[in-house]
Image (cartoon, rainbow, N blue to C red):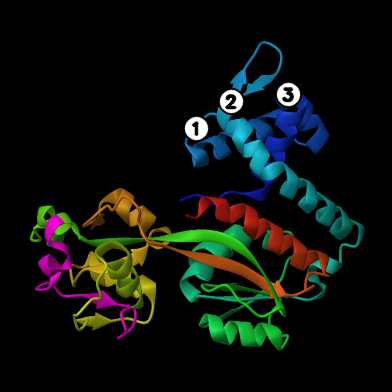
Amino acid sequence: MQELRLSWLRTFVSVYRRGSFTRAARELGLSQPAVTQQIRGLEKKLGRPLFERLPEGVRPTETAETLMRDVQAPIDALGAVVDRLVACPKSMSSRPVRLGGPNELLTTRVLPALGELVQQGLQLRLGFGPSEELLQDLADGRYDLVLTTKRPRARAFSAHPLFDEEYVLLASRRLRDEIPVDRLPEEGPAVLEKYPVVAYAESLPYLRCYWRNVFEDVPGTVPAVVVPDLRGVLAAVRASAGISVLPTYLCREELVRGEVVPLLEPEVPPINTVYLTTRAGGLPQPHVQLVHGVLLLQAQMWG
């Protein structure tokens, strides 16, 4: 899946405000075909048109109005940061931005989201770990930013909700065909007891969350496979090794392709909020501010 680019959003804001691809191209120092290509890329990403073409200029659609409300303030703020970086070009590469978080989230979402900035000179140093360790390392100054799956309570931290990861109970299509999924809503998890489970850890953290919120129960199974990497869990599920619960951001493409399928689609799926956390007052460096702002923008597309 193509990653949303910061440049597309800057171009969108300019087209919206100027009411014209031509005037936006002039403001941004781009060719009109380049502006058109970026808007088309954004429309493809959103799955909806953003502008109606008129004889002179364009008119924003309802989708564009909603998007503009969401992004204009952060885009303007990021623009001010970029201006400071342009005024001092060495500041982008003077020191790496140190970023910590869950390895699967950093590698599948965060790195692609920051690729454009790396091309412009940003240096990144990533580290992985559980939330408690990451927060301690952040407090000790080893990180500038961390992504945590729990909201930190200490006043030493400043946390912004980044996105809600939604959990899905899934299996391969072949294994799903063996499971009487039509009985799940009435009979609950007892229907699944005979089928192997693939888990991230022996304690079944993702299954426990799902069972508690959907079935009001706790899983009583011993996992057949334990893989301390969610991408490994997904690979095992795709190979029909068992059922599992995963965040949808990690398996969205596999769900679209039908390589894995939901076993149940509850009216209110379980979610967990991921937070972008800094030390209180910890965004003095423009390049750290830029990464912080870009992640808040990009994460709107991750859920």
Mark 2: give few (<14), some (14-19) or many (20+) Cα within 10 Å. some
Label 1 or label 3, whichever comes before in sequence order: 3
* Amino acid marked by disc 3: Gly
Residue 32 vertical position relative to residue 2 in the rendered view, above or below: above
Q: Which residue is mark 2?
A: 61
Residue 251 location, quadrant: bottom left
Q: Position of residue 91 (x, y in %)?
A: 85, 68
Closer to viewer: mark 2 or mark 3: 2
Q: Magenta region: which residues?
A: 186-204
In the picture provided, is 161 more to the left or to the right than 28? left
Q: Position of residue 96 (x, y in %)?
A: 73, 75
Q: Residue furthest top?
A: 55
- As drawn, 88 above or below 225: above
2 and 1 marks in contact (CB < 8 Å):
yes
User: From mark 2 to mark 3, how far is it between C-alphas?
Assistant: 12 Å
Marks 2 and 1, how far apart in space?
A: 9 Å
Q: Secondary structure at mark 2?
A: loop
Say whether disc 2 or disc 1 marks the residue closer to the N-terminus. 1
Tally of marks: 3
At label 1, the amino acid type is Arg
How crowded is the residue under tag 1: few (<14 C-alpha within 10 Å), some, or many (20+)? some
Q: Is residue 141 visible?
A: yes
Identify residue for label 3: 19
Q: Which mark is residue 48?
A: 1
Secondary structure category for the residue under label 1: loop
Residue at image location 62% in from the left, 82% down from the top: 135
Q: Would you say 144 lies left or right of 100 here?
A: right
The answer to the question of whether label 1 and label 3 lie on touching residues, with beta carbons closer than 8 A, is no
Q: Residues within 10 Å of mark 3 (few under 14, many from 20)?
A: some
